[in-house]
Image (cartoon, rainbow, N blue to C red):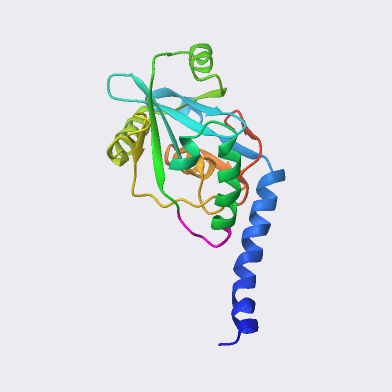
Amino acid sequence: MSRRRRCARRLPPLCAVLASGGLGLVACTTVRPPDPAALAEPCPVFLMRSASHMAFALPDETGRYARFGFGDRRYMTNWTWTQYAWGSVLVVGGLFGQPTESVVERIEVHGRTLAEVASESRMETFEFAVERARAVALRRRLDAKCGPPDPACAWLHATDDGYSVWWDNCQTAVAGWCRELGCEISPWRLAPRWGPWRVERPR
């Protein structure tokens, strides 16, 4: 196959990736939680967001919370200027769908109220109610995804989930978890990579 033909075959997926990434940079992701009045047993959960990361706090059967996030191991373990250099490498790798070494972040949360969780995480925090059974089931599933702790950071755990910066990152992971809890996410697939988030009142 000629080089021109090989490039032509790669162009459509690459354009789609660039388009989705561009929309993600400017579009706002909206979370619409379920109506608390329709829930058999409402349970508060907490969505946390900073300029470079997102996480989600879920309860276990006893009501104790843990915070979960998703990302690339090297990016997550270098909270210095070097993370931006590595982030550019992830962008290039992500354009071609190349997975990197992914990890699940798991940190115990001691707070129980919105103010306490926000103060503890030092991130922009949203609180909304979901069905308790769903929240506990998701917490159990994420706990099961946590493999051995990372030698450099005990709160990071190996996972078998693939990771690439455009296909999946912390934002798309949180969007998927919100859907598992019965929330609506819009736009459906394009925006939850980058850009602002907001939580709407249930319809």
* Residue 68 coordinates in the image, percent (x, y): 41, 32
Q: Quadrant of residue 112?
A: top left
Q: Is residue 189 visible?
A: no
- Let me know if residue 144 is in the magenta part: no
Instruction: In the rendered view, tell whether residue 167 sits above or below residue 68.
Output: below
Q: Residue at x 45, y 55 (%)?
A: 99
* Residue 138 coordinates in the image, percent (x, y): 35, 36
Q: Quadrant of residue 30?
A: top right
* Residue 76 coordinates in the image, percent (x, y): 47, 36
Q: Is residue 22 visible?
A: yes
Residue most toward the right?
Answer: 26
- 49 left or right, relative to 39: right
Q: Quadrant of residue 126?
A: top right
- Let me know if residue 96 is in the magenta part: yes
User: Majority secondary structure of the magenta segment?
Assistant: loop
- 130 left or right, relative to 193: left
Q: Nearer the viewer, residue 20 or 40?
A: 20
Residue extent of the magenta highlight: 95-99
Q: Quadrant of the N terminus?
A: bottom right
* Residue 3 coordinates in the image, percent (x, y): 61, 82
Q: Residue at x 61, y 48 (%)?
A: 88
Q: Nearer the viewer, residue 85 or 102?
A: 85
Q: Quadrant of the C terminus?
A: top right
